[in-house]
Image (spheres, coloured by chain):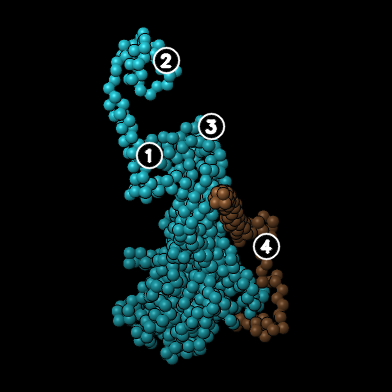
Amino acid sequence: MKTGARNSAAGGGRRSDASGARRERLASGAHPLLNVALPAWRSKLMLFLLFVGFVALGGRAFFLMGGVTTEFLQRQGEARYARTLEIPATRGRITDRNGVVLASSVPARAVWAIPEDVTATPAQIAELARLLDMSAGELKRRLDNEDRSFVYLRRQVDMQVADRISALKIAGIHSSREFKRHYPEGPTSAHIVGFTNVEDRGQEGIELAHERQLAGRSGSRRVIKDRLGRVVEDDWLREPVDGQDLALSIDSRVQYIAYSALKNAIDKHQAKAGAAIVLDVRTGEVLALVNSPTFDPNARGRLSGDAIRNRVLTDTFEPGSTMKPFAIAAALEQGKVRPDSRIQTAPGRLTIGDRTIGDAHPHGVLTVEEVVAKSSNVGTAKIALELPAQTLWESYTALGFGQAPRMGFPGAVAGRLRPAKTWRPIEQATISYGHGVSVSLVQLARAYSALARDGELVPLSLMKVEEPPAAVRVLSAPTAIAMRKMLEMAVGDGGTAPAARIAGYRVAGKTGTAQKLRNGQYVKEYVASFAGFAPVSDPRLVIAVMIDEPGGGAYYGGQVAAPVFAQIAGASLRTLQVAPDGPLEAPKQLLALRQSR
Amino acid sequence: MIRRGAVLLAALLLFASALGLVTAQHRTRSLFIDLERAQQETKQLDVDFERLKIELARLSQPAAVERAAQRLGFRAAGASQTVYLNLPEASAAAPVEPGARK
């Protein structure tokens, strides 16, 4: 017994007496292996290995904390509590000249799913589909698409709806922040304001033209979060810069007046399309710019190219007689004729070279004033042929024809005015009454503003103008005043457009009815137009109206476009509180005339 | 003896200052959380304001006003139903000329 204990003690080395005694009892009888005497070096080796292990650990710890790879580890550690948040910039708002919101962004949610993670009861799916405004079948189809690990269910979901979706607590359905652009005026000002895509980037109109000012710049912010996810410290890496607000020159009241007048006319005359523009004579600001057909920028899923087209700026047409005043003005300016000069227009036809031009009705001898009032092609051509082609071309060019207006709007076109060198006499004659030349409605309106402004031309602006811009003189004041008188006669009893008259204000303007060209041939389709201004004693508004392919039998500018002008001018002048300068009662014969036409 | 006292005092001060630091840090953070919450609230109010402005614009757009007016049977006042008053200063600038049309 004693020897066994000693042996065992020598082998085990560090053993307390009590446990040693227990072991002794256990070892003595049972296991022979425990009685084997172990060599002393084995325990020393063990001790050494343990020591080496600790040294290695210490070395490693030192290496990690003070050594080379610190940065990586610190980054890893930081990633557990620090976050870099992207702070999106809010897109600037677009307002009209009086601060009425035309476009504005509010936060929204994009709802998306990881299809394989989605576990939902049929009731939940049905509720989700209802909130997302889609059928349950459609939703299921999207969620069953297993080979996609990410699928957008709907973008630009309103916050309230998104909150209710997240309240359903369906696994695998997530939402992320984005912005939704709202256009409160909807279709009325859709063409001028334009629209953005789902990423809140401008696609058309002002939204596109002023993308940089509107967009702003997103910022980022480094934050430290505590265990509850609350931000406890922050550090701005880059402050977000919100987009600038834009105030347009548009007056939403005038815009609506123009929109409804145009829309009514298009419905009434079964026209294909139409456009109208209203300019402030004094500042060159565009008060209204409307197109029909139009679209709702709030529901962008159903956009067609035809509806998006801004006809005022991007379409050109042969203006017809609305061009006449400019040839006459050029002749007055050159002293070739005076307003009371007499022109022989009988027999209502004029042959130049191998071509003959004609009037709708033969008129006989007319004064220059009457040529404009009665819209005689022959008279205008005769007057225009008095001028050298180059002079006429220069006059047109000074008025802005043949050049794209610089308005900061995408897609504004130049129209077509060929160089004077290439004009044959017949072309000079037809151009003078608006054929063989193409213009956009905005060019036409701007040129009329020169007549309304005593011969000066100002740059047009779609942005609100604080002080009137510098004007360029293109016609002398006496010429402009003489032209105003002729254009007032054109809406008078003997003129082509009595339907343009309104109660309370004197108006002046010119009709145009042009046949359309298709594949180089004139076809029996028309563009009816009217351009004019009011009140004549001190013009405030220039209004140009264009109706494309009126189909209801009436197609003359005086029947189709002039009434639109009258509606827009009358309501706008009253809305803008312009003092009346004409008789307040609509004359009886005028009422009768309007009904008969 | 004095030296031991000084060391003890320093240790106590150090301990107190350490506690103070922890408290200050905690206070900073909780104040920051409050600030953050207030800023969030500001942002939310801004968003609500924007939303209300859009709603206002939607409801007050001329098309909506006209629809409501039609429902109520209103008509727009024309020139003939309008009484024009000439202010003493303005009368010279913008006289009403009856029969000005020639």
Residue A62 is left or right of residue B61, and the answer is left
| Residue A532 coordinates in the image, percent (x, y) | 52, 75
Task: Determine which quarter of the picture holds residue A419.
Answer: bottom left
Residue topped by disc 4:
B75
Q: Nearer the viewer, mark 4 or mark 1?
A: 1
| Residue A278 coordinates in the image, percent (x, y) | 53, 71
Residue topped by disc 2:
A21
In the displayed structure, A363 sits above or below A10; it is: below
Tell me the element at label 2: helix
Residue at the bottom extreme of this rendering: A335
Q: Write down the colour of chain B.
A: brown
Q: Which kind of residue does numbered mark 1 sit on?
A: Arg
Q: Which kind of residue does numbered mark 2 sit on?
A: Ala
Residue topped by disc 1:
A148
Tell me if mark 2 has few (under 14), some (14-19) or many (20+) residues whose alpha carbon lies within 10 angstroms of its own.
some
In the displayed structure, A381 sits above or below A102; it is: below
Tell me if mark 3 has few (under 14), some (14-19) or many (20+) residues whose alpha carbon lies within 10 angstroms of its own.
few
In space, the residues marked 4 and 2 are separated at their CA atoms by 116 Å
